[in-house]
Image: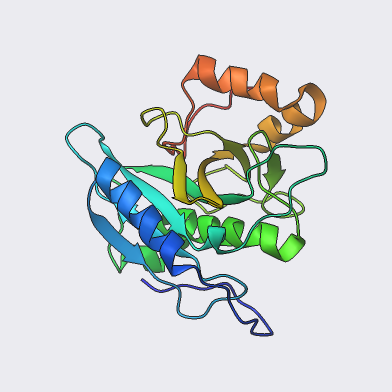
Amino acid sequence: MNSSDAMEDFVPISFDREAIERIEEHVYQHIGDGEVFHEVMSEIVHVDVHVLDPTSTRDYYTLVTTGMSDLPMQATDGTRDPQYAELLMCLPSNWSLSDDALRREEHAWPIHLLQRLARQPHRQRNALAVGQAFSHTDPPQAFASNTKLCGVFISKPTLFEPGFERIDVRDDKTVHLLSVLPIYNEELAFTQTHGPDALLDLFVTNGVNELLNVNRKCVC
């Protein structure tokens, strides 16, 4: 499947082949084989999504972007947010990823979401970092007809061994993997009142992680 964000003006892209090859080597070594969903036309950075197959120890697909880390993010002053990052999400092993299924948004939206989010910090000149929570539209709207999830929470990966989230490309470049957790509007509102750490505590208590469940119970 090929996909790209709709755009009025084409912007030349940045491309770091060394980083992409190192990220691919890292995720394939730790997880296994899969396929790549390529963009046809890209803006600012070329974002592909690697879909790694379920294994005997991981009964889910693992989605990892490449291309977001081609450019550094502009971290908030005074923070230690990662400068280079890629995004990760997991899908149930029964999620349909055939060409026919991915023509429908109820199956394709996780891939589209990762591509949009990977480009967001470069468009908005900011950074994605652990603990951020926001809606993907204003006002909030569900990602697709098969779920009421409508926002995202950025977290550290929890389904993988320690150290998996860090990829040393070269001496001057380390890429961090950030998990994307789709959330409900009530959970987004909760972070605005109680802070992201309080929501993360509820996620841990209720077993919410980067493995997507489109019908999971709202933790708030």
Residue lying furthest bottom: 9
Q: Please provide percent x and percent y for residue 101.
A: 33, 63
Q: Is residue 31 visible?
A: no
50 sits to left or right of 54: right
Establish if 195 lies above or below 28. Answer: above
Quadrant location, the C terminus: top right
Residue lying furthest left: 56
Establish if 86 lies above or below 55. Answer: below
Viewer-nearest residue: 96 or 209: 209
Q: Residue drawn 31% across and 58% down?
A: 97
Q: Residue drawn 46% across and 38% down?
A: 165
Q: Is residue 33 visible?
A: yes
Q: Please provide percent x and percent y for residue 211.
A: 41, 36
Establish if 138 lies above or below 60. Answer: below
Q: Choose top left, top right, bottom left or bottom right for residue 56.
A: top left
Q: Residue drawn 62% across and 73% down?
A: 44
Describe the colour scheme in one phrase.
rainbow
Establish if 68 lies above or below 64. Answer: below
Residue lying furthest top: 205
Residue lying furthest front: 171
Q: Choose top left, top right, bottom left or bottom right for residue 12.
A: bottom right
39 sits to left or right of 200: left
136 sits to left or right of 21: right
Q: Please provide percent x and percent y for residue 84.
A: 58, 51
Quadrant location, the N terminus: bottom left
Viewer-nearest residue: 148 or 42: 42
